[in-house]
Amino acid sequence: MPRFSSLYQIPARILLLLSFLGYVLLAFLFPLLPNYDLLPVGDIRTFAPGMVAGALYGVLLLALFALYWLLYRKVLDDPSASLKRVLGASCLLALPLLFIYPINANDVYRYVIRGLISSRFGVSPFEFAPADFGDQLYPLLAGEWFDATSPYGPIWELTASMVTSIGQDSFLVNILVFKVLGLLSLVGAGAILWMLFALRGPGGQKNLNRRAAFTVLWALNPALLLTFVGNAHNDALMIVILLTGWLVINSGYRGPGFLLFLAAGLIKPIALLAAPVAFVSSWRALDNGRSRMTYLLWVFAGGGALLLLAFLPFGNPA
């Protein structure tokens, strides 16, 4: 690809600066601060209603992905980049996204409202919907889910309750805290991936040499930055717990690691799809009946206790 070779010569700092400016432009085009209480809840078309504006948004996204690919290639050719530099770059690019309106998914509004159901009113979001509180919880901000109870797990609702305990009655502060939580989860998952690559799984030394580039694929990905920070989506916390569980399993602690897979399912039930893979992987690594019986004890006794403790603050899980 000789015509593109000059692009690969652009210094990483310049690529990073251009990426940062692209995210700043996104935050300027879709500002959160003056629109966080917009009714009805907005989306991309609210801020870019015309064909030209929509096309410009698409071009900007393509440019961010192109810069992301060039940054990956730079690190792939020079694997000396440290974890600190990779995650620092991720935080830099995420900074403008703390102030972007959640244009791609407005679930964060439901996170805030259901967190307030628990922290302000002291009742369960599994029993009460936003509509049950009239105008006290701005039901229109819940969108089409205003009359629905929580579809998430108890660990997530406990997290939401803690977040809204910090933000109190300020919708804006609560949204910003959820965004910070998404950023911390993104960075935490990047650090765990770095450690997983250091375990030298498939690929051995080659995998270890390229772990900086592989971590860049996660930490600087525009789709993940927009989803986890821009939209504050709770998938970020679910994924970081899944990755932590996989790290613990690969470190030899298979029972506790599997419980983390179950804990991720108590954030979003879809995470339980990964649990059979973790179970079978751990089971096959055990070489005698005693270790397998100990593992089963962790699975059934530990899993039951985790489920009970997670639902305990909300009363009877039935």
Image: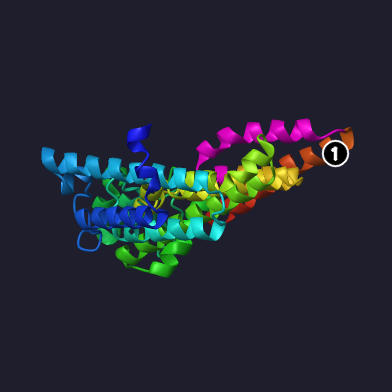
The one nearer the camera, 289 or 17, is 17
Q: Is residue 84 magenta?
A: no
Tell me which amino acid carries mark 1.
Ser
How packed mark 1 is, by other alpha carbons closer than 10 Å (few <14, some 14-19, many 20 or more), is few
Q: Is residue 253 above or below residue 89?
A: above
Q: Where is residue 141 drawn, in percent x and y?
A: 26, 52
Q: Where is residue 258 drawn, in percent x and y?
A: 68, 42
Q: Quadrant of the N terminus?
A: top left
- Magenta part, dominant SS: helix
Q: In this view, does 96 lie above or below 317?
A: below
The one nearer the camera, 206 or 164, is 206
Which residue occupies 23% across, 46% down? 43
* Region of the chain picked out in magenta, as a range: 264-287
Q: Is residue 20 above or below residue 146?
A: below
Q: Name the residue under label 1.
A: 291
Q: What element carries label 1?
A: helix
Q: Quadrant of the C terminus?
A: top right
Q: Does the magenta stretch include residue 267?
A: yes
Find residue 181 and report its image quarter: bottom left
Left or right side of 285 for 312: left
